[in-house]
Image: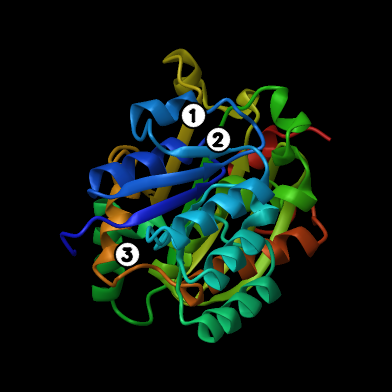
Amino acid sequence: MSSEAKNFALIGAAGYVAPRHMRAIKETGNNLLIALDPNDSVGVIDSYFPNADFFVEFERFDRGFDKLRRNGKRIEYVSICSPNYLHDAHIRFALRNGANAICEKPVVLNPWNLEALIDIESEFNSTANCILQLRLHPQIQALKAQIAAAPKDQIFDVDLSYITSRGHWYFTSWKGQDNKSGGIAANIGVHFFDMLAWVFGDVTKNDVHIHSGDVAAGYLEFERARVRWFLSINSKYLPDTAKAAGRTTHRSLTLEGKEIEFSEGFVDLHTRSYEEVFAGNGFTLKDARASIGIVSDIRKIAPKGLTGEFHPFCSLVQD
């Protein structure tokens, strides 16, 4: 990584994940010069970059961005933490202005959005980097090595469940609107689907059993795995052990019935992601193809109900 500090802009400064990006910019020794969000609840900036310029209107942000360039402070990276449906527009803004992008997941909602951005990267000779942080988790890297070392014809049985409780606000916000968030599979599950494709290879089958505003579940087959998955933001589906412990999140990945423990080690993954970008090892738009294809298909597949290989938690869901 170069010792010379890089200049950053940030779009979506009031978002849930924005502080992780601010921290990553700070911990990698770089500068946040300018930020944008229509919501002005961004006091968290003071903890990292109190001198950063802040705008609530894109047009004024654009003007400030250009003024910095004309004053010899070129923005080299734009961190994008905006609502999912705006990611591709904000990546285009970065690339067309000669900056590289670092974008939160899901980088786009549809495969065709991804292909258009790949073309624009070539046109403007800039790069869009994706946050695919589970690929950097030590336990997931160990799992990938384990699968690679196993006999090539071995197919593994995997169960994935992720429940992260959200309140009523979720459905009023953009996150509760499928055309803006991509639905629950994209909004809270896309990084798990990326991890599964990275570890187990290309997807060959995609069934959906349940798909509603607060829960989605299905079955995926990869080259090396059969995966039953369950995602929800509804706390009533938390296992009793989680409820008894007062936990509002449950995350489980089992391989052949054995738990793969990866609940810890998430805190520094955004900083690690930034370090990899600066080292020339950032995750590309092409790396995101598999997971974006999976969640895009999930939105279009008609749920088949409790038939076939469904996740055990599906039995908890009432019509």
The crowding category of the residue bearing disc 2, from other C-alpha atoms within 10 Å (few below 14, some 14 to 19, many at least 20), is: many
User: Residue 318 at what x, y percent from top left?
Assistant: 78, 32
- Residue at figure coordinates x 74%, y 55% from the top left: 307
The correct choice, above or below, for 135 with respect to 53 in the image is below
Report the residue marked by disc 2.
Answer: 163
Q: Secondary structure at mark 1?
A: strand
Q: Position of residue 194 (x, y in %)?
A: 48, 62
Q: Please, what is the three-letter code of the amino acid marked with disc 2?
A: Ile
- Residue depicted at 41% across the width and 46% down the height: 33
User: Which of the two residues, 310 or 244, is positioned nearer the viewer here?
Assistant: 244
Q: CA distance from mark 2 to mark 3?
A: 30 Å
Q: Which mark is residue 249?
A: 1
Q: Which of 238 and 189 lies nearest the eye of the viewer?
A: 189
Chain-order first, disc 1 or disc 2: 2
* Residue that label 3 marks: 277
The one of 194 and 219 positioned closer to us in this rendering: 194
Q: Nearer the viewer, residue 76 or 229?
A: 76
User: For residue 100, which quarter of the picture?
Assistant: bottom left
